[in-house]
Image (cartoon, grey):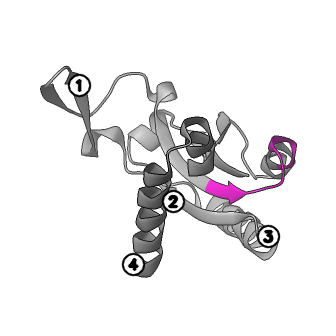
Amino acid sequence: MRVMVLVKGDPQTEAGQLPPEGLVDEMTAFNERLVQAGVMLAADGLYPSEKGVRVRFDGTRRTVIDGPFAEAKELVAGYWLWQVRSLDEAVEWLKQAPFQGGEVEIRPIFESEDFLAEYGNPELRAREDRLKTAIAERS
């Protein structure tokens, strides 16, 4: 199963402060272990919300809202994409992360098969397969 591990923002990440070099070193070592174990598929930090936008949808109307956004604790400062056998395995990996505070959320990812099995539409499956192939060819 794939999971998205969401690192929550805080006032420091929203201020654009980079973590101390020691923490970056510890995180790099942790990431190296994740890669060696075949768990990590991707990981990145995100710029503060002041550099982002939100798009609100209301019927056919689209409204662009410039950052920054209130409530730093509700924002995402970074993420990992992991391949694990179970949610419990993801939790065990996350417990080893060198965080000293904050909150991190783990969410299972819907795979296209989860949707396709529900709908049973062969044309929809073929379209999804074409998308996956096109993405793989660009990587």
Tell me which numbered mark, 4 or 3, is placed earlier along the sequence. Answer: 3
* Viewer-nearest of discs 4 and 3: 4
What residue is disc 2 on? Answer: 44
Q: Which mark is residue 33?
A: 3
Secondary structure at numbered mark 2: strand
The alpha-carbon separation of the residues under discs 2 and 1 comes to 27 Å
Q: Which mark is residue 124?
A: none
What residue is disc 4 on? Answer: 138
Q: Position of residue 114 (x, y in %)?
A: 63, 42
The alpha-carbon separation of the residues under discs 2 and 4 comes to 19 Å
The alpha-carbon separation of the residues under discs 3 and 2 comes to 16 Å
Q: Residue at x 43, y 80 (%)?
A: 137
Q: Which mark is residue 57?
A: 1
| Span highlighted in magenta in the image | 81-89
The alpha-carbon separation of the residues under discs 4 and 3 comes to 27 Å
* Viewer-nearest of discs 2 and 4: 4
Tell me which numbered mark, 2 or 4, is placed earlier along the sequence. Answer: 2
Secondary structure at numbered mark 1: strand
Residue 20 occupies quadrant? bottom right
Decide which of 47, 79 is in the foreground and name it.
79
Secondary structure at numbered mark 4: helix
Q: What's under tag 3, amino acid-wise?
A: Arg
